[in-house]
Image (cartoon, coloured by chain):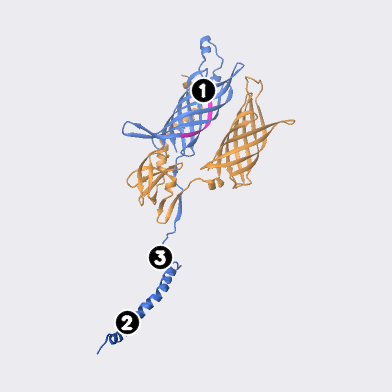
Amino acid sequence: MNSGNSFRQSAPLRATLCICWLAGFFLPAGLLWAANIQRVQVDDAYIELHTGAGRGFPIYHVVERHHWIDIIKRKSDWIKVLSDDGYTGWVFIDQMQLTLIAPGERAKIDAPDVQQFQQRKYDISIMAGDFAGAAALSVVLGTNFTENLSGEFGYTTASGNYTNSLLWYANMLTTPFPDWWISPFFSVGFGHMKNSPRQSFVFADETSDLFANAGLGVRLYLTRRVYLRWDVRDYVVFINDNNSGKFREWKLGFSFFF
Amino acid sequence: METRFFIFLLNAPRLLRGLGLVLLFMASGPTWAADADKAAFSDDQVIQPTVEVHRVTITAIDSQDLEIGIYRSRYITEDFGSNSTIGARLAYHVSEDFFVEASIGETELSKTTAEKLFDFDTLSDADRKLSYYDIVIGWNMFPGETYFGSNWAFPMQLYLTAGMGNTEFAGEKRASIIAGLGYRLLLTDWMAMHIDFRDRMYDVTVLTEDKSSHNIEARLTWSFFF
């Protein structure tokens, strides 16, 4: 009874769930339509077909040298293939690198690596940390203009003992040494902060103010599309003409690049 | 009379010719071998034993690393009973071992035991709406297969999740820590069913007392890969 009331009253949630339900009918058909089948020949002694996209799934068939396979789809580092004798299975990407498209032409499957990390175009970061003593959670969307200059747009929510804060900001970042394994960066930007005092403790009104921020951080490439990011940032909040507030924030999290 | 010596003299030219040929052959052997060696490493060799291999990148492979799903769950809020929840999740599979998931959900809190016994309300109807969102990292720790009867086998994964989020009710937001355990059954390559349990931990203040609250959620999720 309670869940029915909450469902009827939440229009955005109803819309989201309806879209998901409808997408469930159309997505599989869309996948078939978009599939791009490519044919390669096995050049290693044999390749192993697993029942699922992971090394923990059992091997149930092998395709020997000189036999042809069709590439169907991909999940992370696993490629689904169809053999000529009708078996489908998942092959690890390292084994797929030992296949031929044509005599003398070895197939190379695009695999994210540190070189792609240095040439990335977009990234998304999810970080947690501390904003002026409050637990903070941030989501940041970034884009690289050059290998040294990038921009980002971020959203932070901080829940403290006495106030809850929401921050929106836009920053410019400069990376002087993008080729380093641990690569430092510097950032400046501005944004908007909304403070909501917790009424259990503080009887005060909500406040909204603009702020400027400057910070520094480091990026550390881990594997595939993931890198670690840490940064510390100082905020100057423009409360009024005669008053400003200063806060410090640190965050640590994972970033994914595309 | 013909002696052996006389016979030898008569055959001498033939013998000498043969001996000369042998000597000539022996003298030219090293030269011929040297020429053969030179021919083996010559740039003008007709047959090239190695084939130059080109690498051609295959880029247009349909990738299914994103997963979107809807779920129905039972959310046990400490002090406020057990309530049905409805929500949605979005996950990105970084590798076969790790994924990142964001989820949102909403429910409505029921009355506490004290409210029922003494017929009073500590929260208004608007404050009883609980909504949450969280971002967790998952680790697929035990991949394998699940068997139904003797003819059906489906890939499955047992996974752990941990992360942070926000829980909002009674007009306040609370930073939450989430830890959980889940089971993913891959019905097809593009469709999966999940059963997972999560503990959402946050601090609450009851009158003047602070305490750490544990809230268990049991979810049944239907998700699709694309």
Query: How far is disc 1 from disc 3 in space, using C-alphas?
Result: 76 Å
| Type of secondary structure dominating the magenta stretch | strand
| Label 3 SS | loop
Return the residue at label 1: B215
Residue A232's x, y, as percent? 64, 36
Image quadrant of residue B149?
top left
Which residue is identified by label 3? B47
- Residue B178: say if magenta: no
* Magenta span includes B136: yes
Give x and y (percent) for residue B134. Answer: 53, 30
Residue closest to the eye, A140 or B180: B180
Front residue of A49 and A154 = A49
Q: Which residue is mark 2?
A: B15
Q: Identity of the amino acid at label 2? A: Leu
Chain letter corresponding to the colour blue: B
Which segment is the magenta one? Answer: B129-140
Kindly identify which chain the residue marked by label 1 belongs to.
B
Indicate which disc, 2 or 3, sits on the residue closer to the N terminus. 2
Mark with earlier residue (1, 3): 3
Crowd class of label 3 (few under 14; some 14 to 19; many from 20; radius 10 Å) = few
Viewer-proximal residue, A169 or A68? A68
Q: Which amino acid lies under the numbered mark 1 shown in the image of this protein?
A: Asn
Q: Secondary structure at mark 2?
A: helix
Q: Which chain is orange?
A: A
Is residue B29 depicted above or below B144 in this figure?
below
